[in-house]
Image (cartoon, helix red, strand yellow):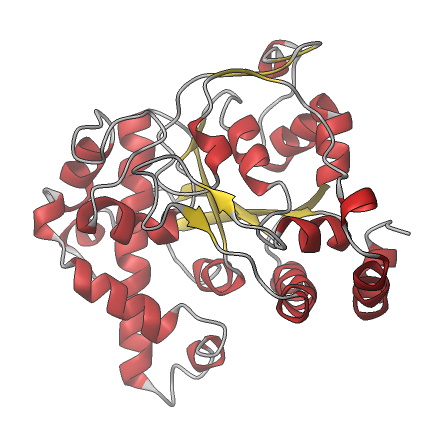
Amino acid sequence: MTGRAKKRAGSPRTTVLFVGGMPRSGSTLFDLMVGQLPAHCDVGELFYLWQAGPLRDQLCACGLAFTACPFWPRVGKEAFGGWDQIDVQEMLDLQRRVDTTARLPLALLGGLLPGHARRVRRYLAVLGDLYAAIASVSGAAVVVDSTKRPSTAHLLARAPLVDLKVVQVVRDPRGVVNSWSREVPLPEGAGARAYLKARPLRQIVRRWVTVNLMTEALAARRVPLLRVRYEHLVRQPVEEMTRVLRLVGIQPSEEATSFLGPDGLATGRSHAVAGGRVRMISGTLPLTLDEKWRRELPGWKQWVTVAVTWPLMRRYGYR
């Protein structure tokens, strides 16, 4: 347990709205949208903070480098006494050793594997301090983490100082496959590479099924979970944001969703530390449904995708 965690023993838990689901399912758009809600602070994919921030000093969504950003240095000071006071390599090692799908079952055997249990406690203590500092510096009641990784969400469900809520963002798997069929450029300085790599069909359909099933499984652990379809998010954004507000216990109102208008989504600069290129957008973003897969994805790929994912597609309302 970190020094700050000891001081906070008995303190109220930090409400974390965790965005789960398969990448390229509209989660960055959701993150950008929900970050405009009152009392919400979106920080992007926090799992990648350690590489993007202290290690590589990449661009924050505010347009400044991590160390020049007015937000993240304050968070580091609040959480750890400064980013130089936390061992980044230790955190990367902990991620590899506890926060993966393959290692997740080990967390359930804490009594039999005390060494692994200690690593999990250390990992969650650091994350607890980090979330609390984000809430303190931003003044927000809800920290929005769009990491998406099911393993992270399942570990957070065990974190004593985190009040976890989960939104599962789903998209027609044919749209996800089509998006992963091409490289996606990133803004200069916003990532370790200049683009996100394309992935093969077999990998994407397998991950679409496993990631969504693992995210669904959080409900069985009594974690409050809300499913949002990308297609509904674009077509009915006010309705979806109203559902999110109810999930975190905030009274919905017209004022709370006033950033959604006939021209689209009115955004301000956020401090999302990692995520899709949409996070760098500031201004009004038109909400246009992306269904390029209907004309771009070859017929045989559509057929294979449906054949593999059909049970979940049907459950989520896709045909």
Q: Nearer the viewer, residue 232 or 276?
A: 276
Q: Where residue 312 appears, x then y in whole percent? A: 80, 62
Which quarter of the picture shows residue 305?
bottom right
Does 294 sit above or below residue 258? below
Q: Where residue 47 appears, x then y in whole percent? A: 37, 53
Which quarter of the picture shows residue 71?
top left
Does 124 sit above or below residue 37? below
Q: Where residue 32 appears, x then y in whole percent? A: 52, 29
Which quarter of the picture shows residue 72?
top left
Does 208 sit above or below residue 75? below
In-image side of 267 versus 181 (left or right)? left
Q: Nearer the viewer, residue 210 or 300?
A: 300
In-image side of 210 versus 184 (left or right)? right
Task: Please give the count of numbered marks on the rendered protein.
Answer: 0
Does 128 sit above or below residue 202? above
Q: Is residue 161 visible?
A: no
Residue lying at the far right in this picture: please name it. 319
Q: Quadrant of the N terminus?
A: bottom left
Point 53% across, 22% down: residue:
37
Q: Is residue 138 visible?
A: yes
Point 66% across, 58% down: residue:
219
Q: Where residue 160 appears, x then y in whole percent? A: 38, 57
Point 26% across, 64% down: residue:
92
Q: Nearer the viewer, residue 84 or 4?
A: 84
